[in-house]
Image (spheres, rainbow, N blue to C red):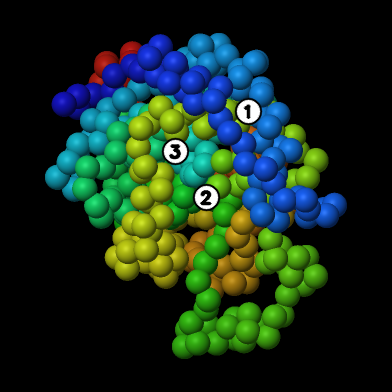
């Protein structure tokens, strides 16, 4: 078992690529129904979308070129971490900033995304302008997703994933850190905030969902919710799996690059795991699932920032979130455009929000961060400095 990070290079065997190629070249596309205009996606992804995507995979997609680009773009590592009497070989990207005062940030992806969603966020290691905050970026792959190994027994839910992420940050020498995530990443980071608030002292999410307010603790908020006291824009947002899911959760004028869709699919094929499906089962746990996370309010120790995009799959209003989500919401931005994958679809807006949020952290938590993080960083081992 490797207790220290090991550099990782993505290299898929020719046998596996032959297997994938055979499946793609012999694929049979099921004929679709004849849908009226504007209703083409009502029964899932249309044949008219699948056919050119498969043809692109057959004739133009070059995995080896993509593989090289991933290896050239991301500084990747694996590390063995114990959790729940088993060992997870956790894959992650780690880009350290050369800027003084850089803050460790863990970027948490979800489904059907993956760690390469962080690519645009890597510019935060050296952001433009002397006033912009720099970050050390850590982007793990969820256990059982793409390049991280899978849990070997049931019960590995969100709390355990959060524990693995926390152990990773400590192993990298980051005693205190902040996080950013959407989809499952937002739930994992919220679990981190609930269980390790003295370590994850700042959290920014782009999936603001929560449970209904309590009739005992928040009767007025519940009344507003029950009587639909929403603005017209709030009403619109409340109405709001790989190709189908990304289509429905992005703006109509955003064009998904076929290479990106195929690469995301390839990364899940490479994993040889159904961990990305099991997480939905584990999330039903009363003690380690979404209900437990959404039913607990993040303490005032953690400064929360929220970015809300109109084409995302979940939404809560600010007044609702104040009552049930967090004690210390420092920023809340609602955008006119964007969807479920802002780091891909509208990275500039997300980066601007992250910068605004980090500036708005209250002085107590920010000074606490400076005291602990930099001391820990300076005591990092030579291995961490050289390898990570």
Tag 1 residue: 54
Camera sees residue 322: yes
Compared with 8, 122 (above or below) is: below
Relative horizontal placement of residue 19, taking residue 330 as reference (left or right) = left
Relative horizontal placement of residue 270, taking residue 153 as reference (left or right) = right
Q: Position of residue 329 (x, y in %)?
A: 55, 60
Q: Are marks 1 and 2 in contact (CB under 8 Å)?
A: no
Quadrant that contains the C terminus = top left
Quadrant that contains the N terminus = top left
Circle 1 residues within 10 Å: few <14, some 14–19, many ≥20: some
Tag 2 residue: 183
Circle 2 residues within 10 Å: few <14, some 14–19, many ≥20: many
Q: Position of residue 379 (x, y in %)?
A: 27, 26
Circle 3 residues within 10 Å: few <14, some 14–19, many ≥20: many
Residue nearest the observer in this picture, 351 or 108? 108
| Measured Cα–Cα span from mark 1 to mark 3 | 34 Å
Q: Position of residue 345 (x, y in %)?
A: 68, 38
Residue beneath the point at 61% across and 22% down: 57
Tag 3 residue: 106
Camera sees residue 173: no
| Measured Cα–Cα span from mark 3 to mark 2 | 15 Å
Residue beneath the point at 41% across and 67% down: 291
Q: How many marks?
A: 3
Q: Secondary structure at mark 3?
A: strand
Residue nearest the observer in this picture, 66 or 357? 66
Residue nearest the observer in this picture, 221 or 285? 285
Q: Secondary structure at mark 1?
A: helix
Mark nearest the camera among 3 and 2 is 2
In which quarter of the view is residue 370 placed? top left
Question: Residue extending furthest right?
Answer: 37
| Measured Cα–Cα span from mark 1 to mark 2 | 27 Å
Which of marks 3 and 1 precedes in the sequence?
A: 1
């Amino acid at each position: 078992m490797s207790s220290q990070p090991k550099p990782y290079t993505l290299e898929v065997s020719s046998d596996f690529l032959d297997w994938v190629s055979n499946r793609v070249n012999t694929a049979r596309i099921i004929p679709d129904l004849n849908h009226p205009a504007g209703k083409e996606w009502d029964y899932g992804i249309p044949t008219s979308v699948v056919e050119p995507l498969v043809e692109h995979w057959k004739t133009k997609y070059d995995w080896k070129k993509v593989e090289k680009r991933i290896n050239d773009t991301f500084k990747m590592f694996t590390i063995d971490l114990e959790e729940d009497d088993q060992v997870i070989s956790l894959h992650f990207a780690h880009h350290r900033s050369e800027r003084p005062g850089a803050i460790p940030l863990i970027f948490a992806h979800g489904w059907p995304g993956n760690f390469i969603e962080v690519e645009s966020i890597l510019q935060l290691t050296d952001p433009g302008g002397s006033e912009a905050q720099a970050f050390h970026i850590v982007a793990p792959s969820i256990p059982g997703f793409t390049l991280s190994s899978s849990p070997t027994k049931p019960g590995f839910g969100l709390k355990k994933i959060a524990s693995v992420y926390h152990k990773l940050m400590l192993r990298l020498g980051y005693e205190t850190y902040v996080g950013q995530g959407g989809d499952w990443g937002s739930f994992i980071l919220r679990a981190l905030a609930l269980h390790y608030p003295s370590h994850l002292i700042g959290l920014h999410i782009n999936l603001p969902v929560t449970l209904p307010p309590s009739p005992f603790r928040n009767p007025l908020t519940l009344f507003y919710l029950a009587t639909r006291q929403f603005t017209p824009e709030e009403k619109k947002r409340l109405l709001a799996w790989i190709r189908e899911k990304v289509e429905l959760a992005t703006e109509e004028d955003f064009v998904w690059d076929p290479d990106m869709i195929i690469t995301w699919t390839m990364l899940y094929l490479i994993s040889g795991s159904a961990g990305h499906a099991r997480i939905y089962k584990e999330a039903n746990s009363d003690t380690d699932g979404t209900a437990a996370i959404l039913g607990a309010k993040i303490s005032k120790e953690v400064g929360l920032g929220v970015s809300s995009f109109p084409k995302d799959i979940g939404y809560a209003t600010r007044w609702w979130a104040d009552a049930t989500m967090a004690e210390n919401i420092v920023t809340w931005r609602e955008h006119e455009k964007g969807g479920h994958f802002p780091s891909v679809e509208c990275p500039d807006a997300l980066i601007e929000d992250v910068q605004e949020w980090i500036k708005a952290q209250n002085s107590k938590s920010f000074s606490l961060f400076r005291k602990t993080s930099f001391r820990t960083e300076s005591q990092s081992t030579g291995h961490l400095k050289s390898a990570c």
